[in-house]
Image (spheres, grey):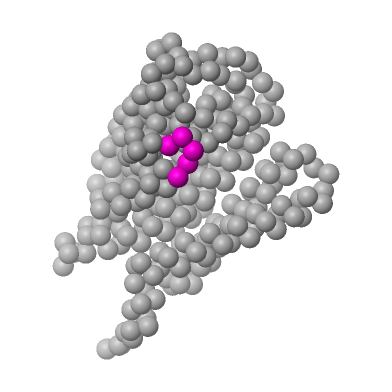
Amino acid sequence: METITTKQKFINFPLTRIIIGLIVCFISFIIAQQLAAKMLDLTSLNKDYRNLIKGIIASSAVISTYIYFFRKYEKREIKEFSSRGIAKYLLGGTMIGVVLQSLTMLVIVLNGGFEIVSVNPISNVIIPFTIAFTVAVFEEILIRGIIFRIIEEKLGSYISLLISAIIFGALHLLNNNSTLISGLCVGIEAGLLFGAAYIYTRNLWFPIAIHFAWNFMQSGIFGAITSGNEKTSSLLTTKLTGNSFITGGEFGPEGTIQALIFCVLASIVLLQLSKHKLIHPYWKKK
């Protein structure tokens, strides 16, 4: 019988894997961003296009790092980034994100709090597009790919969903104009939704697509604030007015009651469809 040493136990301990994985992926993302920025600064490209290319390079770097690192560390095939079904996951996830964000904004429109100030050139969506896909890739790898996945192995799907949702919401409390309510909204609606999306497909491309479409529609198309951050350029310049429970106030529409309701409903549907894919905690496996 093979004896597992104390060193091996420490290396394979879930918390160790999470911490090392987070550090490695975070560092690779930052280094790729910095190197790409320095190289692109030497070109005559427009700043928006430089940022777009930088985002693509940084996102590609963190995906490649995740795949290579965990293939070596965990000695397995990285199925969560499999290209099998990728078109279906990207298209389906994008559609879900678009619909959920559009429904959220529709409530504001019906409440009389949505005003279009101007329609801008299509080039205005480059910046929010870049931010949306870069953030989606980076956050989904860290939160769902590393934290959720590794916790789920031991504690099961439901407990992992709860823990990763709390972490996701807490991280958004660091943003400008955030409140305890907005943090709870993000944790519940997005933390549960993206986690449920991963459980349903066991593929990170699906939650990445939902995450991207949600943020891009919110900031790049509807011109709203995203997670309390400053407004970016957008296709529509808009003005949201009314009760902050409906508009999200200075945090943005994802801090609204309707966003919470729509995303929780979508999460419930995905979890119901994923019953046979749920992982039980280790004490129920024995």
Residue at 52% x, 48% y is 137
Residue 124 coordinates in the image, percent (x, y): 67, 29
Residue at 33% x, 27% y is 257
Residue 14 coordinates in the image, percent (x, y): 34, 67
153 sits left or right of 250 in the view: left
Most frequent secondary structure within the magenta stretch: loop
Q: Nearer the viewer, residue 89 or 38?
A: 38
96 sits left or right of 132 in the view: left
How many numbered dots are placed on residues in this image? 0
Q: Look at the image and give the residue range highlighted in magenta.
A: 174-178
Residue at 73% x, 44% y is 50
Residue 275 coordinates in the image, percent (x, y): 24, 47
Which quadrant holds residue 233? Answer: top right
86 sits left or right of 188 in the view: right
Residue 86 visible from this viewpoint? no
Which quadrant holds residue 219? Answer: top right
Q: Nearer the viewer, residue 92 or 256?
A: 256
Whether residue 29 is in magenta: the answer is no
Residue 246 coordinates in the image, percent (x, y): 38, 21
Residue at 42% x, 70% y is 74
Q: Nearer the viewer, residue 195 or 243?
A: 243
Quarter of the image that includes the C terminus: bottom left
